[in-house]
Image (cartoon, grey):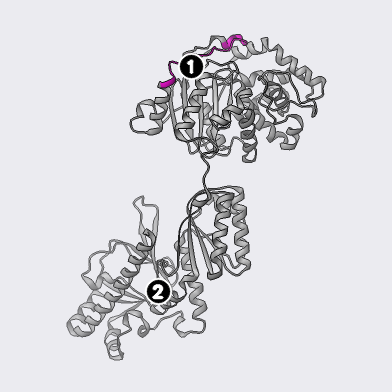
Amino acid sequence: MDHTETTTPSRWRPDDGARFPIASGLAEVHARFRNRREGTVATYIPELAKADPGHFGIALVTADGEIYEVGDAGVAFTIQSISKPFVYGLALEDHGQAAVMARVGVEPTGEAFNSIVMDEKRNRPFNPMVNAGAIATAAMIKGEGLDARFARVLAMFSRFAGRDLDVDEAVFRSERDTGHRNRAIAHLQLSAGMIAEPIAEHLDLYFRQCSIRVTARDLAVMAATLANHGGNPLTGQRALAPKYVKNVLSVMSSCGMYDYSGEWIYRVGLPAKSGVGGGIIAVLPGQVGLGVFSPLLDAQGNSVRGLLVCEELSRRFNLHIFDAFATAGAAVRRAYDGRTVASKRQRRAWEQAILRRAGGEIHVYELQGDLYFASMEQLFRRLTTDIGRLSYLILDGRRVARADATALSLLSQMRAVFGDAGKPLLLAGFSEDIRAAMGADPGPPAPLPFPDTDAALEWCENQLIAAAAAGDAAADATVALAAMDVLADFDADDLAVLRPLLTLRRYAPGEMIIREGDAADRLFLLASGSAVVSLRLPDGGRSRRLAAFAPGVAFGELSVFGGGTRTADVIADTAAECHELDGGGLATLAAVHPAIYAKLLLAVGRSLAERLRRATAEIRALEA
């Protein structure tokens, strides 16, 4: 059998161990078991007897595609029975769960992998991990003729591995020529009506699938693809529909290690599958995939060193599936209300007064980790406790990594329940994948998901202000010069002096009012419309929204305190009008009317001090 190295790239090698704890852990485990020589290579298939008993490789791949490997992780060998869960997955895609369950059960047998024992009560093999079940599963693969059917199997395996796989023809011939027990199993199934002709074709398909060549690295990628809900983390290709991944992992958990399966799940706690070629594959859903290769087998047909490695890594990295799940108590990272943290929109004094009174009706919940049934149930209880004193609830999903189908369903139900009560539940900062999976918006009064929490806060503040200011003249779309906050202490004579020094300019939506790097040579008083402060990020293609201005607010205060250059862009968000006091006007005011200039300096200073006070309070609240 050809033990050639593959060319699949890896990121971490054993010599990275000093820098990376996972690589170091793999190297230590490999060194610990490298000299173990218990077991024997498989001989019932003559070609497998040629395996080098010294070969020993370990590979680990995370669900987001990081590769760690040590030893002979690139040595090729035949996949053998590790093929069974993947072909089972293809049969599920071809026929659906009910049809496959009618032909192949999911109960562990406690018998050897090549046992001829069947479930006579239901007239089917006990599970797809023993040979009888695997032959029945192979018989269900669709296609016109052996070549077409096997091409589908090989293509699926290649999607799982992230590279084109092939068949070890020598092993295939050896299996086909000596597979008399498997032929007996197939004919027994045919006589009982468990499978139908063509028997020879089904068997050749089964022998070929077992003869596909892989490496420990390939097995780890295939396991990581299962951990990643059927999506290959290296290529992004979908290898198996997510709804069938749980079925595959379930039978791997209960039946994947033959008559050692019970002790395996007890000790190691990972869905797994072994093969007599010396491979073992193991999966921690959502986190990691593991592949081990060592051809020395125990009496059950499992790799001796493979068992030792998996048990040690499970213990060392806390991978046991019943010890690695998240807890519901971590769903809410932090909560605060709209009085403690406001949006970045700079508002007029009367608007700020409304928000100081009513801002507590807005509540933000910062979520973290994965969302699933238990975490969502805990969140639901938290929200229903608080809902009596709130009008608006914002869920900040920036730190949510994943939400399963149950979480998304509960989230939709939450939005509907609170929406029916007239209390919008707003989603902010969730990933595009989660927003897409949420589907259609439930309708008013809950708006579409917001890109970030600041936008959601601003929307809620606008609702509170609009409700409180209904019919109030202060809420007019255009703000007169005398009503500007920064000019609140100016009397009619002061305004008469100031007005000739101002220029009224109009800006179209999207037009630049201030450009980063320009001289800070004028003060702006926003009379109508809206403007946003935008900082260009170093990558040159993106910008970040820092603040927004409402009518009646002043900006560009640097011009009053010594100039310099602008540090960000200010862009008209809508059609806008600004009263502008340029450097010449400021100089005239200082020289001819120093008392009025001093009054302006004091007003601008108070405005800046108030912004600093609010920023300090928000930082304290968010760091608490």
- Judging depth in this view, the residue of 163 and 80 nearest the camera is 80
Q: Is residue 12 left or right of residue 495?
A: right
Q: Which mark is residue 136?
A: none
Asked if labels 2 and 1 touch by Cβ distance under 8 angstroms, the answer is no
At 62% from the left and 69% from the top, the residue drawn is: 421
The percent position of residue 99, horizontal first and vertical second, equals 75, 35
List the residue tagged with mark 2.
Answer: 347
- Kindly identify the amino acid type of the residue bearing the numbered disc 2: Arg
Asked if one can make out residue 76 in the rendered structure from this viewpoint, the answer is no
- The quarter of the picture where residue 77 lies is top right
Q: Amino acid at mark 1?
A: Thr
Look at the numbered disc 2 and give the secondary structure of its residue. Answer: loop
In the image, is residue 40 part of the stretch drawn in magenta? yes
The part of the chain drawn in magenta is 32-48
Q: Quadrant of residue 562?
A: bottom left
Q: Main secondary structure of the magenta part?
A: loop
67 and 129: which is toward the camera? 129
Quadrant holding the N terminus: top right
Q: Pointer 2: residues within 10 angstroms few (<14), some, or many (20+)?
A: some
Q: In x, y percent, where is residue 445?
A: 59, 68
